Image: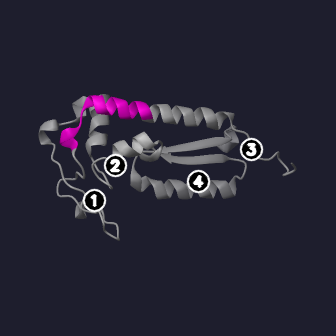
Amino acid sequence: MHSSGFTKLIVVNSHATNGPPCQSALLTLRYEVPSLRTRFVSLYDITAQAAAGYLADADDPHANDAETSMLLHLAPELVHSDRAVDEADRSVGRVLTYPMPEVTLSGVVGRPTEASAVTGKALFGDIVEAITDLLIRARAETDPLPHGGEQ
């Protein structure tokens, strides 16, 4: 990638457990290719609106209102609303983390029964706008100091 001329790399994540390995890879790249500029960002924390949308019905959501709403907007044929069930976030107040099968009977954490394509369109729009803004700013950004470190 860097040898192909790329000097900037932004990894946009949409699955929480992908975060640590992606961030580790970017730290490795930062060490191995110091001239490569990187950034890691997740859809659910790219803006305050995205965080509020993702976390409205659970602190550790999975197939919740936000995710189901975005699917209803983007690919409604993949959503089987007749099968939707709500499950409370059983991880609230716990000290340790737990894999999904230990906190949900259905695979859901949150309230997908409240999902709507309208909500999904708004949340998706906020996320796309934030990613677009981030990419524009990253493209225009220059190094803080000139090469060589002189001011």
Q: Earlier in the sequence, mark 4 or mark 3?
A: 4
Q: Position of residue 73 (x, y in %)?
A: 30, 29
Check disc 1: other Cα within 10 Å, few if <14, some if 14-19, many if 20+: some
Foreground label between 1 and 3: 3
Question: Is 18 on the left-hand or right-hand side of 72?
Answer: right
Q: Earlier in the sequence, mark 1 or mark 4?
A: 4
Foreground label between 3 and 2: 2
Q: Amino acid at mark 1?
A: Met
Q: Could one spot residue 75 in this view of the protein?
A: no
Question: Is 21 on the left-hand or right-hand side of 69?
Answer: right
Farthest residue to the left: give it: 82
Q: Which residue is mark 4?
A: 26
Identity of the residue drawn at 49% across and 57% down: 21
Q: Which residue is mark 3?
A: 143
Q: Which residue is mark 2?
A: 55
Q: Which residue is mark 1?
A: 100
Residue interval drawn in magenta: 112-126
Identity of the residue drawn at 74% across and 44% down: 143
> How many discs mark residues in the rendered view?
4
Label 2 – label 1 distance at C-alpha: 16 Å
